[in-house]
Image (spheres, grey):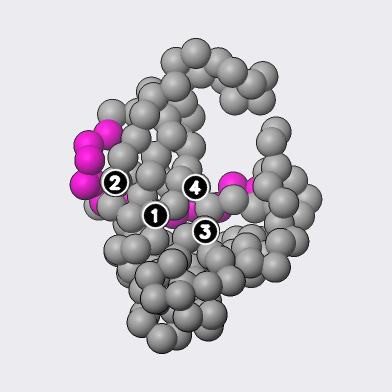
Amino acid sequence: MILPFTEDRDTGPFFAAARENRLVYAACEHCGRGSHPPAPFCSHCREPRSAWQEASGKGRLYSFTTVTHQIHPDYPAPYVLVVVTLDDNQDVRLIGRIDGDAALEIGQPMEVWFEQVADDVTLPQWRPASA
Ligand SMILES: [Zn+2]
C-alpha cells in the first residue's frame, strides 16, 4: 500500500480529520475560495490566511478513468480513479479509488466514505451516492 505523508504542515489537518471520519477542506479567509491541495498561500488571491471548513461529504463526479493494467500489487485491476468536486466548494476537487469496473457518469452525485489503510492513516474515498 502506498501511504501519504500525513504530518505535513499544510496537509496534516486534512489527514487528522480523516482519521476521525471527517472531511475538511482549506478555504481562504480573504476571498473564500477553496484550495486543494492546501498551500501556504491562496492560489486565487495569494493571501496567506486559510481556515479548515467541515465538508458535507457530498460531491459530483468531475472526471474518472478506469485502470485495467495493474501497476502495483496492492491495487488489483480493474479499478476506477475518480475526481470529485465538493458540493460545499466548487474549487475543491478530491481524488478517490473505486475497486472493480464501476459504471459512472460525469456529474453524478457522489458521497465520501473513509478507508483506514494503516493504523494511523485513513483516506477519504468516494462512491456513488445512495438515493
Ligand atoms: Zn483567497
Q: Which residue is mark 4?
A: 125
Residue 81 coordinates in the image, percent (x, y):
43, 34
Q: Nearer the viewer, residue 62 or 101?
A: 62
Residue closer to the observer: 44 or 120: 44
The answer to if 79 sits in the magenta stretch is: no
State left or right for residue 75 relative to residue 69: right
- Mark 4 nearby-residue class (10 Å; few <14, some 14–19, many ≥20): some
- Disc 2 crowd, CA 10 A, few/some/many (<14, 14-19, 20+): some
Residue 77 marker:
none
Q: Are marks 4 and 3 in contact (CB under 8 Å)?
A: no
Q: Is residue 100 above or below residue 15?
A: above
Q: Amino acid at mark 3?
A: Pro
Answer yes or no: is residue 58 visible.
Answer: no
* Quadrant position of residue 44: bottom left
The residue labelled by disc 2 is 62
Residue 92 image offset from top left, x and y in percent:
39, 61
Which residue type does callout 4 highlight? Gln
Q: Of label 4 and label 2, which has the lower sequence position?
A: 2
> Between marks 3 and 2, how big is the CA–CA gap?
16 Å
Give amino acid for label 1. Arg
Q: CA distance from mark 4 to mark 3?
A: 16 Å
In the rendered image, which residue does mark 3 sit on?
37
User: Of the residues tagged 4 and 2, which is closer to the observer?
Assistant: 2
Q: Are marks 3 and 2 in contact (CB under 8 Å)?
A: no
Front: mark 4 or 1: 1
